[in-house]
Amino acid sequence: MKKVTAKVFRYDPSTDDTHRYETYEVPYEKGMRVLGVLMYIQENVDTSLAFRYSCRRKRCGSCGVLVNGKPGLACMEEAKGEMVIEPLPNLPIVRDLVVETTEYEERIQSISPYLIRKNQPEREPEILLPDDFVAVRPLNQCIECFSCMSACPVNGLKWEGFSGPTTLIQLARRMLDPRDDMDRIPDARQAGLEHCVTCYACVNACPVEIGILEGVIENIKKKCIEEEASVYGRYNKAWGDLIIKNGLINPFTLIRKVSTFEKLLGNVLIGIKFFLKGKISLKSKRIPNIDEIRTIRKVIEEEK
Amino acid sequence: MCVGKMGGMMTGIVNRETDVLVIGGGLAGMRAAIEARDQGAAVLLILKGKLGKMNAGICSYHYAAVGPWGNPDDMNDLYLRDVIDAGGYLADQELCKIMIEEAKEGIFEFERYGLMWDRKNDGSMDPYLGAGHSRPRTMSTWMRQGGLDMIHAYRSEMRRRKIPIIEDVMATRLLVKDGKVVGVIALDILSGTLISIQAKSVIIATGSHHQVFPVATPPPEGTGDGVAMAYRAGAELTNMEFVLFVCTLGFPSTFRGILVPTLFKIGDETMHLLNNKGERIMQRYDPEHLEMATKDVIARSIQTEIREGRGDGEEGDTLYVDLRHLPYEAARQKLAEVVFFANKAGIDIKKELVPIRPAAHETLGGIRINKQCESSLPGLYAAGSAIGAIYGNDGIPGRGVGHAVVFGRRAGQFAAQGAQKSDRVSIEDVKDQLDEEKTRVFRPMERRSDIRPIAVMRNLQHVLGKYFGWAKNEKDLTAGLKEILRIREEQFPQISLSSRTKRFNLEWIKALEVENLIDTAEIMFEAALQRKETRTMYVRDDYPDQDDKNWLKHLVVKKQSGRMTFEAVPVKLLYVRPGEGHKL
C-alpha cells in the first residue's frame, strides 16, 4: 500500500520544556489532504494529537497549518511524500498544532471592521449596482484563516508598525464598500501599509485566492493618495510635483511639504545624520531631459 | 466582540456572571446575543470553537423570504403553505407563521450589517426559485456563498458591539435552582478548567446532533450538547424521531460535505445515477421521470439498491453519479463546487464517476419552545437548530437560515426581557451541582482502561447508520436501541483517555460529546418506535401509510423522575389543513 510520511510538531506547554517532532506513516488514499492525514493519526495512531478543523471545504478557515514551511489550510493542501506539519508561526502555541489567535483578533478589532453609515437608506431594499461592488466582492471571501499573516515576512518581524495582510483585507472591505461613510484613512495610516514590501507571499498563501496586493494594498494606497491625507499620499504627491516643477528633489522643500513643524523638529537629529552621511546633499543635479518626464505625466493624466 | 479573560477562582472553578448567557456562536446564537445586547442586557456568548468558524450556517447557501423582491403575487400565506406541505402537516403552524412574517426583516437587516444580496444589473434584488418553493423568493450572495457572508455579517455586528465572548468552551450542564435555569457549567477547552456562569436567562443555540450518524453533511461539532443538557435538566424535547436525509453526498473519502445536486438539466440531459454494476438505477424504479423523479422516489430507489447489495464501499452504501456524458464546460459552470472538489479528490468528471453516499443532513429534533422561544423550564430559551423543528418532518431549502435569524432575534429579545424580572443566584447556591459536575467531567480523565472515546463514538455512529436509516422498521429500531443501551452500559462507563493533559485535549471533549450523543440517540430510537406511520420523508416499512387519525401529533419527550416519558400532542391546524398545501 502506498504511504505518506508526516513529521508532526508536538508541544504541550503545560508539561514539555520544548517541542519535538513525531513521525507517522499513514496509508495514502487517492486525493488525500493533509487534514485527512491528521485525522488518520488522531483516530488510529495517537489520539492525543491536537489540531483544529471544522467545515473541510475552505469556508471556516479553522485548519491553517504550515506544511513544509508554507502556510495553508490542512483541508486543501495535498498530502504527498514526506511532509513536515507545524503550527502557524508567530503566535502562542496552545498545544501541538493549535495556536492562540487573540492577538490577530485584536488587530482586526482596532480598524472598526463593520459597515458605518451616516444615514440609513430611505427605502429598503436599496438599489445597489453590482458594478460598484466589483472591487469589494472578492474581499468578502476572506475567511480569516491567517495564512497570509503567517506568510508575510514583515508581519514575521512582529513589529507594531504593521498590522498585517488580514487586517488590511478587513480594512479594504469597508473602504471599498460604496455604502461605508467612515473616514478610514487614519486607520490606513495606522496600519502601516507603506511597510509592505510587495513580495507576493500573502497572495500565494491565500486559499481563497484574494489578490491581496492589487485588490487590497494597492487599492488602499490609491485611496490614501486620492485623499492626500496620509503622509504616504502627501509624500508621493509632493515628490512628483517637485520633480515636475524643478527637475530635482530638494530634501528641505520635500520635508516641509509632507511634515508638520513639530515632526520636523523631532527629525532634526536624523536630518543631521543623513546630511553627514551624504544622503542629503545641497548639490543635487537637475534631471537633464525633464521635458520627457513632464510629457509622460501629461499623457498619464490625460488618460485618467 | 472581545475575547474574555477569566477571573475569580473558587475551588478550581472560574466564576462569571451575566444577565443573558448565549451558548453557541452560529447564526442563531450571534443574532440572539446582538438582540439581547440591543435590548440593554449584559450579554456573554460562549461557544465550543472560534466565533464565525464552527457552525453549520457557514455551509448554507440561501435565505428565503417573501418581500418586494419577489413576484407581485407572492405572499406570506403561499410560503406558509409550501413549508407546511413539505413538513407533512406536522408543522407548528403558529411558529411557522411567525418565522415567515419576520423573515423579511432579516433580509434588510443583513444588508444593514454589510452583506449584499444578489442584484440584477439595474440594482434591484435578484431572487431565484428554490426547490420546494412555489415562487422565486430565495436569495443568495455573490458566488452562492450566502452562509459565509451571513456569518461574517453577524460577526461584524458582534465586533461592533464588543459583545463579550469566551471561545473554546463546552457547556456541560445547566445549573438549576428551584426549577429555574440559573446558569451553566462549562469546560474551558484551552486550559481544562471548569467555568461556572450564573445568568438570569440562558439561551441554547448549540445546533443539531447530526454527529450521531456515521456520515453527515454539516460540520463535526454538532453533537447535541445543548439538546442533551436541556433534556437532562428536565426540558421538553420534540420531533426527535425526524432526520433530514440526503442521498447524494459526494464522497471521495477525503472530501465530505459536498452535495451533488440531482434535480438539474443541461440541455435535455440529466446526471445518471449508477449502481456498482454500472446500471442506471432509475430505469428500474421510475422509467418515465428517471433522475428527475421526486426526492422521496429517488431516496427510496437508492435505499433499495443498497439493501439489495448493489452498492460499493466498506459499508456497501456507495453509489455513483455519472456526469461523463454532459458537455464539460456547461457542467463545470452548473456544478462548480462539485467539480472543484472532485478535481481536488483526483476525480476527472469527464472520465470518472463521482461516488455518493446517503447522509444525515440535519437532525430535526430539539428543544420544544413557545412563541417567546421559552423552553418548558423557566429561564431557559432556545434558538436555531437546537429547537425541535417547527416545520414538521421535512424542510424546504432556504427556510433554515430564516429560522435561525427569526428565532435567534426573538430568543435574544425575550431572554433580555425575562432577565429584567429575575435575580441572579450566587455561586454558593449551586455549589452542590458544581461539585457533582466536576466529578462527572473529570471521571474519564482519572479512569484507566483501553476504551477510547473515538472508538465508542464510531460504534454509536455505526448503530445509527445500520438501524436508523431513511426507511425504518420495528425490528431494526428495537435492535438498534438495544445496541445503544449496551454502549451506554458497557462501553461508556469504561471510557478513558490516552493523554491526561488538560490543555486542548480533544479526546476529553469527545468523551463528553459521546454522552450527549448516546442520550440523543436513545431518545431518537424510542421516538421512532412510537411513531407508527409513514409520512413524506419519514418512512416506517412496517407502517407504510400516513395515519392522520392517530399521528397528526407532535411527539414530546422529557425526563421525569429519571425516566423518559412521551406525550403525543395534537397538531393545531390553525391556518392550513392537510391537502390544502401547495403542490408543485
Image (cartoon, rainbow, N blue to C red):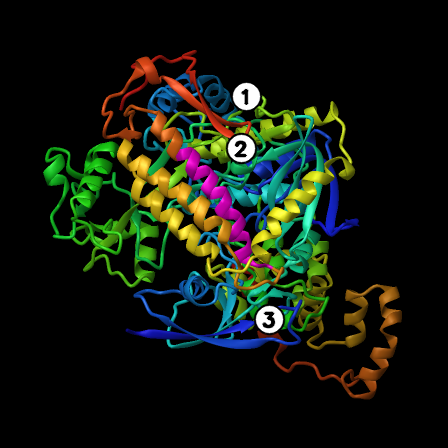
A260 displayed left or right of B465:
right
Can you identify the residue that label 3 sits on?
A11
Task: Look at the numbered disc 1 and give the secondary structure of its residue.
Answer: loop
A259 or B257: nearer the eye?
B257
* Number of the label disc, if any, that sits on residue B231: 2
Q: Residues within 10 Å of mark 2 (few under 14, many from 20)?
A: many
Task: Mark 3 vs mark 2: tell me if same chain.
Answer: no
Task: Look at the numbered disc 3 and give the secondary structure of its residue.
Answer: loop
Q: Chain of mark 3?
A: A
Q: Was residue B505 drawn as part of the magenta stretch in this picture?
A: yes
Q: Residues within 10 Å of mark 1 (few under 14, many from 20)?
A: few
* Number of the label disc, if any, that sits on residue B370: 1
C-alpha span from label 2 to label 1? 16 Å
x then y, percent, for residue B209: 46, 40
Q: Was residue A297 drawn as part of the magenta stretch in this picture?
A: no
C-alpha span from label 1 to label 3? 48 Å
In magenta, the rendered stretch is B504-524
x then y, percent, for residue A228: 70, 58
Task: Look at the numbered disc 2 and give the secondary structure of its residue.
Answer: helix
Q: Amino acid at mark 1?
A: Asn
Task: Mark 1 vs mark 3: tell me if same chain.
Answer: no
Q: Amino acid at mark 3?
A: Tyr
